[in-house]
Image (cartoon, rainbow, N blue to C red):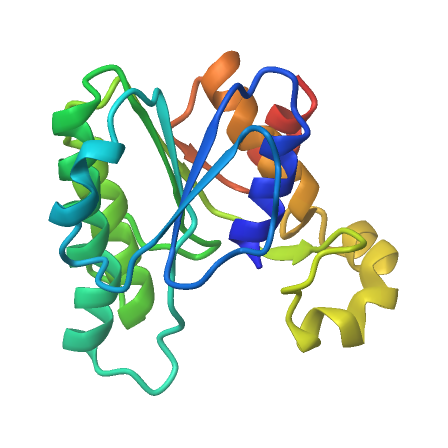
Amino acid sequence: MVGEGVLYECLNHPDVEKVLVINRKTCGVSHLKLSEIIHDNFFDLSEITENLGGYNACFFCLGVTSIKKKEEEYYRLTNTLTIYIAGLLLNLNNDMTFCYISGTGTDSSEKGKSMWARIKGKTENDLMKMKFKKVYNFRPGYLHPGKGLRYSHTYYKRIGFLYPLLRLVFPNYISTLKELGQAMINSITKGYEKQILEVKDIIELSKR
């Protein structure tokens, strides 16, 4: 859902010249700016490495839920995979900015009781140690999807009518998917003073 929403904002933004999407199955979108590579094994991108150079930003929207997953499996799918891809891209693009979709409640100390929050926190910390031009960790909460997106979770569709009230009552935890996409683009074109962006930062940056 996040990937589709961010892609939509990129394709419709005048400052974005070209977008490469790497998917396990086609995103079903056709656009002059868009190139797509279908690839099954994200832990081995050696077959497509020659296509990954010449980009100044990575919007890393891949992620899995921790529900019903043991810590070792979640760590592999969250930290190990992210750092592998980040390292590969960094070697090919030394002027790249890396934008990582994390989440509200992520534990930067890496010592809390919540397994997913510790692992997300370590992933953020590991990325910020890498020699990218800049690393931004986005921590969205509830994301309200826009109209016309195909991959919005049923959960969001069921409670979408509550969005105006939720935003009023919980302003630090509620934003739109459009605001997230705009904020990620603006982090590249305009920069931001923080590397970890909570919901209020995402909303602020989306308006710049």
x then y, percent, for residue 85:
20, 45
Locate residue 29, reporting x and y percent: 61, 49
**Is residue 26 rendered to the left or right of residue 203?**
left
Please state the horizontal and vertical placement of residue 67, each as a whole percent of the image. 39, 82
> Which residue is outermost to the bottom?
68
Of residues 92 and 80, the one drawn nearer to the viewer in this rendering: 92
Q: Residue at x 34, y 87 (%)?
A: 68
Nearest to the observer: residue 144 or residue 27: 27
Residue placed at 16% from the left, 26% from the top?
92
Does 81 sit above or below residue 67? above
Q: How many marks?
A: 0
Task: Say which residue appears at 31% left-offset and 67% top-offset.
Answer: 116
Q: Is residue 18 visible?
A: yes
Q: Is residue 109 visible?
A: no
Compared with 152, 92 (above or below) is: above
8 left or right of 45 in image: right
Q: Judge whether 74 appears above or below 143 on screen.
A: below
| Left or right of 33 in this view: 177 | right
Q: Quadrant of residue 40?
A: bottom left
Q: Between 114 and 18, which is closer to the camera in this rendering?
A: 18
The residue depicted at 30 percent of the width and 56 percent of the height is: 120
Quadrant holding the C terminus: top right
- For the N terminus, the image quarter is bottom right
On the image, the x and y values in percent for residue 188 come to 46, 19
Dividing the picture into quarters, in which one does residue 89 lie? top left
- Which residue is nearer to you in this view: 120 or 97? 97
- Position above or below: 93 against 47: above
